[in-house]
Structures are given as C-alpha cells and as structure tokens.
Amino acid sequence: MSNKQKAINGGKWITIATVISTVFQFLQVAILARLLEPAAFGVVSVSTLIIAFFNIFGNLGFSNSIIYKQESDRKVLSTLYLLNLSLGAIISVVVYFSAPLIIAFYREPRLDSVVKLSSLYFLIVYFGQIYSFLLQKELRFKAVAVIDIIGTFVSTSVAIFLAYQGFEELSLMYGQLAMQVVKTILLIVSGYGLFRPVLHFDLKIIKEHLRFGMYNVGDGLIGFIQANSDNVVVGGTLGVKLLGYYTLASQLAVFPIQRLNPIVLQVAYPMLAKMKENEEELKKSYIQILDLISYINLPLLAGLYITADSIVPLFYGPGWETTIDLIRIFVFVSFFTCLSHPLFTLAFSKGKPNLLFYLNLVTLVIKVPLLYVFAKNWGLTGIAMAFLTATVINTVLNFFIVNSLIGKFLREFFANVMKPVIFCLLMIGVVATYKSLIGFEGVTHTIVEIGLGGMVYVVLTLLFKLSVSEIREFRKAV
C-alpha cells in the first residue's frame, strides 16, 4: 500500500474514531451536567489544567522529533523511553505534593483529592506513549483509532457509573485514569512489534531529539500559558463555579476543532515529513489542508452559533444559560484557531519548531494585558473577548510565518475560504428566519434547525464546491 493510500485509510479510521468518541463525550457531558453542579466541572478543569501543564515537560516533544527524524534505532528509542518514564515519576511526585498550593490559590478544599488523583496520570501514560508515536510514524492509524474508541468508551462508562454512585467530581477523574490504563495496555500490545525496549540509557545519542524537544517544551510552555491564562484568571479571581460555566462553554465551542482537526493533521504531519524537501508540494499540501479544515469546521461552528440557545437547555438542562453568550464568543475563537493549526505541520516538517515558540511568546505578551483590561471592565464576558482578540492577532502572525516558509499563499486561501463563509452566512440566515417565525425551544425545533442548516450547506456545496462524481471518486479511493 502506498503512503497516499495509507494516509487516506488512516484518515478514514481517525474519522470513525473521532465520530464515535465525540458521541460518547457528548453523552457523558449531557448526563453529568444534570448530575453535577457547575463547581464540580470547575474543579475537574483545574486538574485537567495541571495535567496539561506537566505533560509539556513529560514528553519533551519526542512525538514530533521521532516522526521528523523517522527514528527507528532501538537504543535511541530505549533512551527516550526510559527518560520519559523517569520524568513521569518525578512529575507525579511534584503534582501530588503541590496540592496545598493549588488549594490555596483557588480557595477550594475539594481540589485536594482531585489533584492527588491526577498525579497518578503521569505514572500510567508514559508507559504506552512512545508506542503511539511509532504507530503514527508508520501510518498505522487504524490501531490508534481503535484504541482511542475503546479508551473513550471505558472513560465514559466509568465516569457516568461513578457519578450516579455519588462520586461527584471524582467520577470524572476516575474515568480519565481508567481510560489511560486501558489505552496504555493496548498501545504496548499493538506497538510492541515496532519497538522492544532494552536497558540502555545514553543522553549523547539523543542530542538531536533533545535539541528538537527543547524548542517543543519552550513552545508548549508558552503556548500553554497563553492558551490557558484565561482559565487561570477565571478560576483564581471569580471562583470555580464561574470557571465551570467558562469551561463548558469553551469546550463545546472548541470541541469541533479539538476533535476534527486531528483527523487531518495527525495524518498530514507524517506525510509532510516525508516530502520536506519539496517546497512546491509542501505549499500545495498546506493549502489543501487549510481548505479541508475550513470546510469541515465552519458549518459546525456556524450551526453552534445560531442554535446555542436551543442546544444548551436541551443537552445540559436548566442552570447553564450563562454559557450561551460565552459559546457564541468561543465560536469565533475556534474559527481563527482552526486557521492557525496547520502551521505546526509546516514548522515541524521544515525542522523549525522554534517558530512556534516565538509565535506563542509574542501572543502571550499581547494576551496578558488584554485579559487584565477586559476582565476589569467586563468580567467573565470580557475574559472571553480578550481570548478572542489575542487569537485573531495570533492568526495574523501565523500567516506571516507561513508566507515565509512556503511563499505567497493568501490569494489561493481567500479564494477557497470565501465559499464556506458565504454558505455559512446563508445557513445562519435560514435558521434565524425559522427561529423568529416558528420557534426555537424544545427537541423538535432543535432538530429542525440542525436539519435546515445542514441541508443548506450540503446543497450549496454540491452546487458550487463539489460534484457528485468527485464525491464518488473520493469514496472509491477510501
């Protein structure tokens, strides 16, 4: 099977995994939103923040360096593996004993058990992580997809069961830990044929990986701060209850980006890494990736924007109305984030992760004062607006970097993106008309709104973007 066929097949499997895991996660949040109070989501959000922060140091960006260098040396991989396990153990201890400091900052005693439980994550995840990298390097996305599906099913089942048993916020943490245990075991079983670790540790032979990784850590650290500074401000100044509202709104609006973009980018990066010397092919592939991501994400975001006041009460029940206006702001955050994501495929393919570090550093310098000014004047909504403003600036700078890597591309990009933007505006107009003339509350109206919007976008796509014959050819290729 050629690399192109592997990529198409991989995209199919990642898509299947994403759709299934998305359904399970929506089911989980919809059920738990009725069982748990907003503060419980805020508490878990803090632990998720902690895990994401220490993960930056735990994997040192080795996933990208292994794929970029197409690494297969057993001694090198064993050194990386042992280094990851050592870092995981150290981080686990640090997180466990940092609980009092975190409780003091957020003024929330319930964080004690959650933080200590989250420390176990680092003792589990790094045993299987390198096998995930190697499976992706070899374009074996079916295995990765199946493991993700099983892990999501386990997580959702455990979290819902324990929530009904009265475990409250701990139900979400136990669900996450159960998922990591299952995924780690399955990754080791699936990838053991690609790599069998030996007791070998030599930092000299991983110098290139460490150099690559240091920029990844720097970029990850700055990126984490600039991406999550709003959550820290909300939780630290406004409390975990408002953080719960803020978290649920951002998760719902950013959800399409988090779930759908990896389908394209996870497959695209290993492919681009194999063509890193061909400038013309890189440019062509980048524009195609940007076009595909825009076309997939824009209708979902536009649909969420116009139906937020119908979806929130239906899915999450009463008491979550505060999230509606926040969701509509985060829709635009997601739109610009979606346009920024493909840069990493270029930066890593060209061996220049430092560009991402500098981009996030500049964005952070801009975002922090914006958060202060906007929060002081407009509270929770102001913090969301500051995040949006910083994201727009980040996207503009992002495109300048892309231009320096592959040459002029904006004319082609705007020619491609105008169609889905126009289609989305027409879709919003049709749904808004239905809501104003007929209604928007309840299951029936929500289903009709989603159906109408989807129909408008599909019809316009078939008329002006893709022909039926092109769709048939794509299906045959898959």
Image: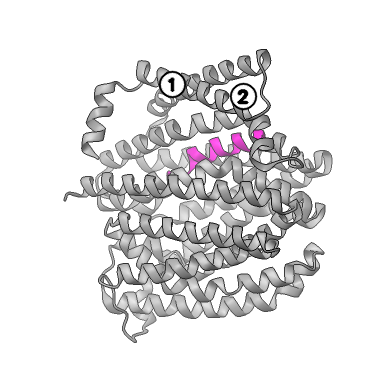
Q: Main secondary structure of the magenta part?
A: helix
Cα distance between the residues tagged 2 and 1? 27 Å
Q: Residues within 10 Å of mark 1 (few under 14, many from 20)?
A: some
Report the disc number at residue 445: 2
Is residue 68 something one can see in this rendering? no
Relative height, residue 437 to residue 357 (above, below): above
Regarding mark 1 in the picture, which secondary structure is present there? helix
**Mark count:** 2
Label 2: few (<14), some or many (≥20) within 10 Å?
Answer: some
Specify the quadrant that holds the C terminus: top left
Q: Where does residue 125 sit, x and y in percent of width and height?
A: 48, 70
Relative height, residue 176 to residue 471 (above, below): below
| Amino acid residing under circle 1 | Lys
Residue 341 located within the stretch drawn in magenta:
yes
Residue 338: in magenta span = yes
Q: Which residues are magenta?
A: 327-343
Marks 2 and 1 in Cβ contact (< 8 Å): no
Tell me if 158 is positioned left or right of 203 in this view.
right
Which of these two is toward me, 68 or 147? 147
Q: Residue at x 82, y 64 (%)?
A: 107
- Residue topped by disc 1: 419
Q: Residue at x 56, y 47 (%)?
A: 27
Q: Which amino acid type corresponds to the residue marked 2 in the rendered image?
A: His
Q: Is residue 454 left or right of residue 13?
A: right
Q: Is residue 27 visible?
A: yes
Looking at the rendering, which quadrant does residue 162 occupy?
A: bottom right
Residue 352 position in % (x across, y down): 40, 54
